Image (cartoon, rainbow, N blue to C red):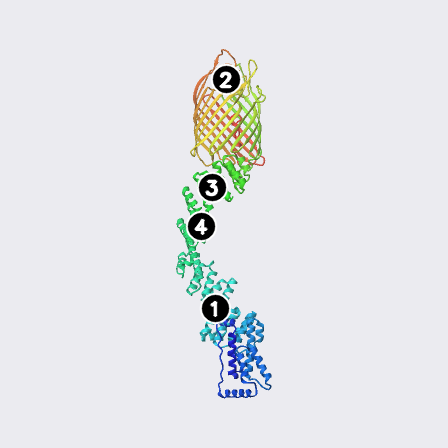
Amino acid sequence: MLLRRLLRAAAVGALIAPSFGGVMTAAADPALAGKAEGVIAIGIPTADEPAQQQEAQAAATQLVEIGPAPADVQAVWDLGAANQWNSAEDRLAGLKAANPGWQPPRDLIAYVANGALDQRIADAVAEHDWTTVLSALPPVAADKCETPFRLFARADALEGLGEPAAINAFYVRALTVCDAPDSVATLAARAASVLDQDGLAALRALAPLQQSASDNAQIGAAYAKIVQADNRLQFNTAINTGHIGAAVALADTSGDPDLLMQAGWAMLETDPSGAGQRFSRSLAESGPEDARRGLVLASLASGDISAARAAVSTAPDPASLAELSGRIELADARVHREQGSWREAVTLANSAVTFFPALAVDAGTIAGGALLDAAGAATEAGNYTKARALALEAADYAPTRRAGRMRAAWSDLRLGNDAAAASLFSQLYVESPEAESAEGYALAAQRTGGMDTAAALARTVGGPLDARLTALNASAAFDQGDYLTAKALAPDSFPPLEGIDSNWYRQAVAVRSQGGTSGQNRLSGVVSTTSAGLIRGRNRYEAGVSVYSLDPGRSALPAIDASRETVAMPYLAWAREGDTSIAVRVGVTPLNADVDPALVGEIAIAHEDAGRAVEARAFTRPKMDSVLSFAGQRDATTGEAFGRVIESGVALRGRLPVGKSNTLQADIEATSLHGENTADNSKLALGVAANRNFARKGFAYLVSGLFYQFQSYDENTNFFTPGHGGYFSPQTFHRTGVSLNAQTDPMKHWILKADAAVAYESVSEDPARANPLMRGTQPLIGGSDSSGFAAALDLSAARRIAPEIILSGNLSAIQSEAYEDVRVGLALTWVPGGRDGLVRNDLPQDPFNPTAWTQP
């Protein structure tokens, strides 16, 4: 309808003012009117001279006289005024056909022709047939401005075809030659939204447009839009090509609040302070409220929480910025957490959730983290109860639930709540089988004796628990001296154990000199022991033979026929390390002795847990107090062999820790003694000790304390005539004293062990029959009571003199009222492949002390 009104106005103008040579029309397309931001006013031209009007009227009168009736001609005008241009054309053609020789008025012809052309243009615009629009529009001179209707129709067509170069050229030409303020203002405003950067730059530099902008406020406002659009395109180009500095400079120069805000976002990460300045300028220039959000975030990034709070408080509607308020609380909570104000951090984090519930995860991370920090500080201060409470509070927050429970479990472990710690660690491990819960559960299980349960869980759930249990068992074995176990469980975890599981070969020599009566309890001897060891996992296998050359001296009594003896004792041994260690040794009494050999052996089982230890033994051992008790001898009168005493029995020993450094120890032993043609005997032995362990660098242990020992034999067979065994067998024996026991740290290239004791002894021996095997009245021999001080020293040492060679030796001495005994030994061990650190098993054994042969 608007187009038709414009067309009618144009037609009326043509009728009244034909001397203008054309019809003034304007665009009536609604879309065009919207783009032009108003309807273009159509001016109606009027004749300037009354004479011309009179001539026109006379011509019209003449035409009426020779042509159709005036009413018919008026009908054509009316059809045009009604925008029925096709009908107007048809009616005019009909009039010409019905009235030969009649020539329609020039203004009517122009009126109908221009109206019909504009109608075709308007129809093509309505159908977006841009090619038809451009072909219908008549050419226009380079220095002429089209009518508003055709001007904007051409603009629509060029923009519809989307050819930037043509669009740019049109706007530059139109805004150069057109001078109607309304048209120029509308075109300039429109250009700001459709031109590319080249076109905008051209218009921005266009002198006529600049002049029009300075002369007309409406055109000036449109020109400002062009400048703004050009600035924004330049800004976007700079941003997209990474020239952030140029973009920021452009925003600063333009003063455009939108560009200032965008510049703030562009530099927020790299320069939050500078970004904050741009956001502030944008807000000061009435920029979008999103700049306030940027200002808050920039202030937070700069650490200026007060500025962030001020930005929110000055907002038109602070309540609408709930998320930003929450983030401010979170930032403040982070600061307080970093400053160690953990409780304030928790309060602020909780406040953030009140502002904006969607921040619950971040708030929980900060609040829970602050509580965990506080728990860590309490742990460092040794306040594990407080640490546990804080950790459980942290567990109330979802992001730190697991970490809080983990910390609480560790606190339980430190508090000695081992069962609670094991329960919580196991839950955590089932939820997520990872390293920390595996570590904690393994330690708790070790303390509670739940290693088997933990191992079952490891098999069910999988994960690192099994490896951690193995590593823990290996570490515990290493700490307890079970080095083969540690090596078997974790072959590569303990460098000092390199070669500990290698086979070995040893040659040892020992010398003994025991004082006493010649031919009786006196004993001089040399022992050569050849042995070899085989290691398989936790198991140690050993085989060897000891050759004894013993000389008791010649007795002054003709009834005693003691002689020099050279005998051999082969043996096999096996030991297995573990929580419960086992050692077994099997051998025979001396071969090639006066008395036939007999089977001897021992089994020892030991278990240690948390400082508590128990050891049980069952044995049958040779008695080595003299040649008679060890190898036997012959009766000087009958030639019958007797002696070679074997002691069989059981022993039990226990150790109990008292506090961190003290221990109580007790042992009991009950045995029976049998020999070839020798009176049977039995023995009961008891012992108690109270020791203190002194922790010293470089020592595996350094222990000193008081002890008491008691022995009692049924019979006194400590004589060397037939029927006697030739071994010390008092009816009561009391010994009390002080001892010192020490060993240097193992796993070095040398190791030293020392045992020393000073004691007071009291001995009571009953008189014995000359031959206890014979019945009837006999003379009694011996019998006495004695007491006095005694001292004992036993030193052993070993050193690796080469990777494959170990040299070891021992020295022991006993001095008492009754006798003295000195033993010296040397050993050379070859380890193919070499060894790194030395252990207690590398120290030489005393071949004259069968109680020390089997060590679990």
Mark 4 and mark 1 lie on one chain; the one further toward the N terminus is 1
The amino acid at mark 1 is Gln
Q: Which mark is residue 228?
A: 1
Label 3 sits on a secondary structure element that is helix
Pointer 3 residue:
424
Q: How many marks overall?
A: 4
The answer to whether residue 394 is above or below residue 596 is below
The amino acid at mark 2 is Phe
Disc 3 and disc 1: Cα gap in Å? 66 Å
Disc 2 and disc 4: Cα gap in Å? 87 Å
Disc 2 and disc 1: Cα gap in Å? 127 Å
Q: Is residue 619 left or right of residue 279?
A: right
Quarter of the view holding residue 355 = bottom left
Disc 3 and disc 2: Cα gap in Å? 68 Å
Q: Are circles 4 and 3 on residues that touch, CB within 8 Å? A: no
Pointer 4 residue:
364
Whether residue 754 can be seen here: yes
Pointer 2 residue:
719
The answer to which of 38 and 312 lies nearer the viewer is: 38
